[in-house]
Image: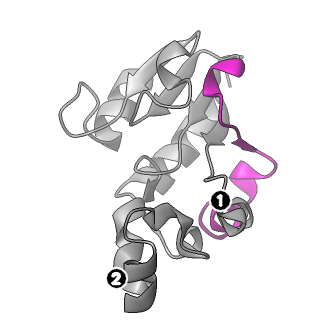
Amino acid sequence: MTNKILYVDMDNVIVDFPSAFDKVSEEDKINFKNDMDEIPGIFAKMDPMPGAIEAYKKLSKKYDTYILSTAPWENSSAWSDKIEWVKKYLGEVAYKRLILSHNKNLNKGDYLIDDRPNNGAENFEGEWLHFGQCNRFPDWNAILEYLL
């Protein structure tokens, strides 16, 4: 393993955020229509992004790898849901490797894989790997090719 530090965002990077929408009640969809991320328990209902779990495990063998995510301030269950999600899908490889912050740029490291510039991602001092369909890094295969 190198001494390089790698941060990986959760929502829409490791976790498929929209995958939870079919698993919430119609009542919650109506009540939280403008703030779906504030539905209690929604973060526990999400599926992994294709290839994300395997990629995280591979990257963890080469890099000092952490999950760096933001949780909605008005949804206190999001904080515990994210911990439970990491335990369920990543287990020991991510043990005590979850950092929840609204200011990602405060963390020091070499790489940050994130889908949006929000919460300090665009001001991260290392290299921001902009994850997403219209970018240089559209999927986990592109990330692995670049970092491995």
Above or below residue 79? Residue 14 is above
Toward which corner of the image does residue 2 lie, by quadrant? top right
Whole-percent x, y for residue 89 in the image: 59, 65
The outermost residue toward the left is 134
In the image, 36 versus 123, the foreground residue is 36
Q: Is residue 148 visible?
A: no
Q: Is residue 27 left or right of residue 96?
A: left
Region of the chain picked out in magenta, as a range: 84-107
Count of picture labels: 2
Whole-percent x, y for residue 113 in the image: 47, 31
- Give the numbered dot on residue 22: 2
Q: Residues within 10 Å of mark 2 (few under 14, many from 20)?
A: few
User: Residue at position x 34%, y 82% from top?
Assistant: 22
In the picture, the quarter occupied by the C terminus is top left
In the image, 59 versus 139, the foreground residue is 139
Whole-percent x, y for residue 92 in the image: 75, 57
Q: Are marks 1 and 2 in contact (CB under 8 Å)?
A: no
Q: Amino acid at mark 2?
A: Asp
Q: Is residue 106 visible?
A: yes
Toward which corner of the image does residue 142 lie, by quadrant? top left
Residue ID for mark 1: 74
Whole-percent x, y for residue 93 in the image: 70, 51
Above or below residue 120? Residue 100 is below
Please tell me whether residue 123 belongs to the stretch shown in magenta.
no
